[in-house]
Image: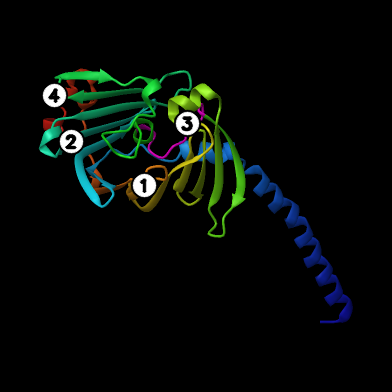
Amino acid sequence: MHRPLRRLALIAVSAAAALSLPLAASAQKAMTGETIARNIAERPNADPRKGTITFTMRDRGRSRTRAAKMLRTESKATHRLLLAFDTPASIRGTSFLSYDHKAADKTDETWLYLPATSRTRRVPASDRADSFMGTELSYGDVKDSFIFGLADYTFSSAGRAANGRYILKGKARDAKTAREIGYGGFTAEVDPATWFPRRITFTDPAGRKLKTIAVRDLEKVGASWTATDFTVTNHRTGRSTKVTVTGLARASGANDRLFDPARLDRAAGRMP
């Protein structure tokens, strides 16, 4: 190539590179914390799924296990989760039901049926921070299914980690919300390929490190991802809960009556 032509080519390449830098910077800047949180909240979740979920609680070398049948469905308005415990025998028949409504002006709903009392109790929003069935998960953790409440937090982005994941930070919107959810804030690593948080570290309402959830494995049914292997570690107590989901598959014949709070006492025997 003649020198003048080579010089022109170099100028063209340099100009293209210079133009691309602001575009790349603009794209990076556009991925705000709010955008990341919305992408997580709006990831595909509509495929009906069933499986067996097992909680293994560990404390000072001792372990206990609880297992439940799991059923998830989603309509245009609501994500629904049903758990019916069958192990150990002492809690067999205990059932948990949650409605996670998509409309911002509609309050999410949660119920728990306890065979010992033969009653279904509605779990109020103020109890979201309580321990779920003796595990290191809260009722809110189980209901939210790795989605951060857009009304609960303000969000910011801390860029990307070396592994390419987005670093999302959340801060409870006010002291009342922090008390209800049990968290003052969190830092999460979010996989942009799935919009699924792979590691979350929560702080308590006072800002002290509280617990970490580390997701080891995901499985896909249709377009919907489910965490099938993750561990919750409580940094305050040293206790941990390992959660696994086995037999994950598409749920056919998921009758709406299964998700009726008035029929929660019969859920265990009617799961698909």
The figure's colour scheme reads rainbow
Depth order, front residue of 35/96: 96
Q: Quadrant of the N terminus?
A: bottom right
**Residue placed under numbered mark 2 in the picture:** 85
**Residue placed under numbered mark 1 in the picture:** 238
- The numbered mark, 1 or 3, whose residue comes first in the sequence reads 3
- The numbered mark, 1 or 4, whose residue comes first in the sequence reads 4
- Taking 62 as reference, is 19 left or right? right
Q: Nearer the viewer, mark 1 or mark 4?
A: 1
Which element carries disc 3, helix, strand or loop?
loop
- The numbered mark, 3 or 2, whose residue comes first in the sequence reads 2
Mark yes or no: residue 151 visible: yes
Q: CA distance from mark 3 to mark 2?
A: 26 Å
**Residue placed under numbered mark 3 in the picture:** 149
- The numbered mark, 1 or 2, whose residue comes first in the sequence reads 2
Q: Are marks 1 and 3 in contact (CB under 8 Å)?
A: no
- The numbered mark, 4 or 2, whose residue comes first in the sequence reads 2
**Residue placed under numbered mark 4 in the picture:** 116
- Picture coordinates of residue 105, whole percent (x, y): 47, 18
Q: Is residue 128 magenta?
A: no
